Image: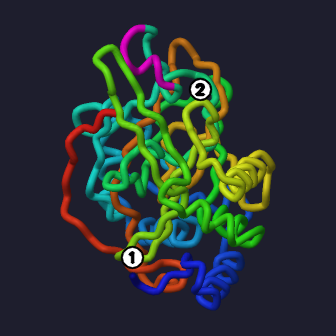
Amino acid sequence: MVDTPFELDAQATYQRWRDSKRASHPFRAEDLVVDVADPRALSDAELQALLQRCATANMAVYRSPVRAQDKNIPRRLAQQLGLLRLDGNWLADEDGISQIEVAAPVGDRAAFIPYTNRPIKWHTDGYYRPQSRHIRAMVLHCVRCASTGGENALMDHEMAYIAVREANPDWVHALMEPDAMTIPERLDEDGVARAEQTGPVFSIDPHSGELHMRYTARTRSVQWKDDALTRAAAAFLARLLERDGPHMFRVTLEPGMGLVCNNVLHDRSGFVDDPLQPRLLYRARYLERLRAPRLSNPVLSPLYRATRPLVLKKWRR
């Protein structure tokens, strides 16, 4: 294991990292925004600006005049950011990229909230996935926005970690237990469509020392470990996300805009579609984190390990 601030016994390392993180973290959503001419072909200055924001806040928002309905936009952007292992889930298209839009009332997509206009509670993507297929980064690109609504709230999961650890380090320990949170199996007419998944909320990558978070604020599709510390930690996280804190951002993506992130905490408000131009976003999810910028702060950006390009076999949710 590399030296990491996320180990509970690395108190001095944690305190240095925490202070640097707090001092450099943005306080306004506008500070996340980078204007780019074409996400498919970033200039070096645009690329480094996006990566610097992600190194600081684990996320960035790009804004461009490119409004084409072109899935090469998120794919090519991701490649420039060091995202190579595109994960193809069950409801994604054959190229591994999902079209997030209100689905027809028949078919598989209509049963899942992202493909409706209903609000989505706080979560990280892929919280129901096995550890071998953790979603570590994501690109969300807007082709068309809703007539009203569809706002995303965003929070850096490392800031959530700091909040929990400062409130009670024992809560962090509880949330790092391998049986902290269980997502029950999902059944369909053929039997078990997705097996039960049990794992921690916070985990540390053994190679890079980076923090990963799997979380959902849903109550009907999650089982928390039945002990006092875990229940208290989960309740603290729920309260933290219910209020507007200084490190919580609200963004409504417009055509040509997009979010790139290391799978930060996020939600989505409900929305109303324009029937002639319904909301459409492309979502590309990856198994590695965003690459580090040049001259990045080593305290904020531990080792990035490059991997070869690969679109993985589609995984049934």
Rendered position, 107 above or below 160: above
Is residue 109 one of those drawn in magenta? yes
Residue 156 is situated, as x and y percent measured from the top left of the image, at 61, 60
Q: Residue 132's image quarter?
A: bottom left
Looking at the rendered structure, the secondary structure element under dot 1 is loop
Q: Residue furthest top?
A: 106
Residue type at mark 1 is Ser
Q: Is residue 176 left or right of residue 286?
A: right
Is residue 213 one of those drawn in magenta? no
Q: Which mark, residue 208?
A: 1
Residue 260 is situated, as x and y percent measured from the top left of the image, at 47, 54
Looking at the rendered structure, the secondary structure element under dot 2 is loop
- The answer to whether the residue labelled 1 contacts the one labelled 2, judged by CB atoms less than 8 Å apart, is no
Dot 2: few (<14), some (14–19), or many (≥20) neighbours within 10 Å?
Answer: many
Q: Is residue 95 left or right of residue 57?
A: left
Q: Please name the residue shown 31% across and 32% down the image.
A: 90
- Whether residue 306 is visible here, answered yes or no, is yes
Discs 1/2, front: 1
Rendered position, 8 above or below 87: below
Q: Earlier in the sequence, mark 1 or mark 2?
A: 2
Asked whether 183 or 283 is in front, the reply is 183
Residue stretch in magenta: 106-112
Residue type at mark 2 is Ala
Residue 244 is situated, as x and y percent measured from the top left of the image, at 79, 51
Q: Residue 185's image quarter?
A: top left
Residue under label 2, please give it: 146
Q: Is residue 72 left or right of residue 281?
A: left
Asked which colour scheme the image uses, the reply is rainbow
Asked whether 226 or 268 is in front, the reply is 226
Quadrant containing the C terminus in the rendered view? top left
Rendered position, 257 above or below 37: above
